[in-house]
């Protein structure tokens, strides 16, 4: 299984990063469509002792795939066959949009990091909703006991002004909540102009309130609602968001999204500058993500679910997040470097340490 890093260097490292992602994702989906994924699942399925309770749901594993890999719900079943306890789809917007011009995805291999300015490229909520419904039904058939969980991450359409952001988020909530196990309001991507301004608590309060009500009404049940925040928030702003989440009785906070910072990188300044603007993800976020998690834990006192993401590469990283107060942990960037058996390897090592939580 550890041959993948060598395969990556030979097959993908020289290739445009977005093209490599599409090829890899297509191969994962092909394995599912030809039945190979179901065979693999016998070896990749999380052990029973990894089952985790969060906001009224049972997750097969505390480790899942963060938003950004499957932006449009094309490969949910295929990805769960690799061992992820949940797959967060998105970010999805109310209107279909192509995202930013390419090239828009760049690797910093020396740092095991990625810079992206994708810009929420997706088919729009109305087109994605049937895919989520189909995937959820299929997972329920295939897993009569505990099935993998589907999260849905929603954001603002680029053409919609901040003054109309709430109504735009409501379009997504209305369409997607019925098929979502949980819903995430993304106000922290650096790649949609002005989006991060919505993290201000006075703006965030009416947005989260409206989305929560719309999601529950559309689904006819309570849909767990979380907010995803940036690592670039000040400590005081993190505290404010945590207190707001408690006040609104949100189900959780996801911390953190990508960063606009470029400090502490091993890659040459010229290499980094050539990538241009965008959000940095991967190993360099590890320390800040842990700091934000600790701060959220201190403010919330375990009253809501914390989902930790950013710089997660190994089972030891996952365990450290769980011990620091996270209930669930997500990864994404390391998936690109570690290959298709990454989640299964993490689950296998976690299962040997049942005291991890």
Image: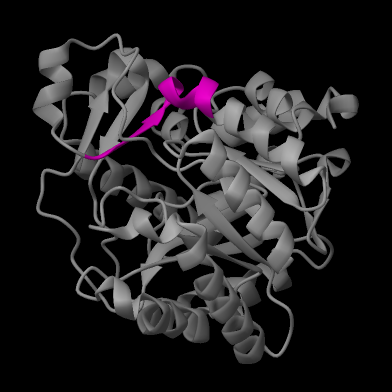
- Residue 6 visible from this viewpoint: yes
Is 333 placed left or right of 152 in the picture? left
Q: Where is residue 177 in the image (x, y as percent from the top left)?
A: 57, 79
Q: In this orientation, which residue lies closer to the viewer: 302 or 104?
A: 302
Comparing 143 with 309, the one in front is 309
| Total numbered badges shown on the rendered structure | 0
Q: Is residue 282 above or below residue 180?
A: above
343 left or right, relative to 25? right
* In-image side of 179 versus 46 (left or right): left
162 or 42, nearer to the observer: 162
- What residue is at 24 percent from the left and 74 percent from the top? 161
| Residue 294 point in image, percent of width and height | 68, 30
Magenta segment boundaries in residue numbering: 278-288
User: Is residue 230 covered in magenta?
Assistant: no
Asked which quadrant contains residue 282, the reply is top left
Q: In which quarter of the image is the C terminus?
A: top right
x, y percent for residue 307: 65, 45
Q: Is residue 341 visible?
A: no
Magenta run includes residue 280: yes
Residue 317 x, y percent position in the rendering: 63, 22
Q: Is residue 28 above or below residue 95?
A: above
- Residue located at (62% from left, 43% from top): 239
In this picture, is 102 found above or below 288? below
Residue found at x 34% / y 52%: 26
* Render colour scheme: one colour
Q: Is residue 124 left or right of residue 169?
A: left
């Amino acid at each position: 299984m550890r041959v993948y890093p060598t395969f990556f260097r030979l097959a993908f490292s020289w290739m445009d990063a977005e093209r490599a992602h599409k090829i890899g994702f297509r191969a994962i989906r092909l394995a599912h469509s030809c039945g190979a994924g179901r065979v693999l699942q016998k070896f990749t399925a999380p052990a029973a002792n990894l089952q985790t309770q969060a906001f009224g749901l049972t997750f097969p594993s505390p480790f899942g795939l963060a938003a950004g890999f499957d932006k449009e719900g094309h490969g949910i079943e295929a990805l769960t066959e690799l061992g992820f306890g949940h797959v967060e789809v998105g970010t999805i917007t109310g209107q279909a949009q192509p995202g930013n011009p390419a090239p828009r995805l760049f690797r910093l291999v020396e740092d095991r990091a990625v810079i992206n300015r994708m810009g929420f490229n997706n088919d729009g909520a109305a087109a994605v909703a049937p895919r989520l419904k189909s995937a959820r039904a299929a997972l329920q058939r295939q897993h009569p006991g505990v099935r993998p969980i589907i999260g849905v991450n929603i954001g603002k359409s680029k053409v919609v002004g901040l003054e109309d952001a709430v109504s735009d988020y409501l379009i997504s909530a209305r369409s997607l909540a019925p098929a979502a196990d949980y819903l995430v309001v993304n106000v922290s991507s650096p790649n949609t102009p002005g989006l991060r301004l919505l993290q201000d608590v006075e703006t965030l309060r009416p947005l989260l309130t409206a989305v929560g009500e719309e999601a529950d009404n559309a689904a006819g049940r309570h849909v767990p609602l979380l907010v995803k925040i940036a690592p670039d928030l000040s400590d005081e702003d993190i505290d404010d968001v945590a207190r707001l989440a408690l006040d609104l009785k949100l189900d959780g906070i996801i911390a953190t999204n990508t960063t606009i910072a470029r400090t502490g990188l091993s890659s040459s300044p010229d290499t980094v500058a050539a990538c241009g603007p965008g959000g940095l993800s991967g190993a360099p976020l590890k320390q800040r993500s842990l700091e934000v998690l600790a701060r959220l834990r201190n403010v919330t006192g375990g009253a809501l679910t914390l989902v930790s993401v950013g710089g997660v590469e190994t089972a030891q990283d996952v365990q450290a997040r769980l011990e620091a107060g996270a209930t669930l942990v997500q990864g994404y960037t390391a998936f690109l470097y570690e290959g298709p058996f990454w989640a299964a390897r993490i689950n296998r090592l976690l299962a040997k340490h049942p005291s991890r939580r």
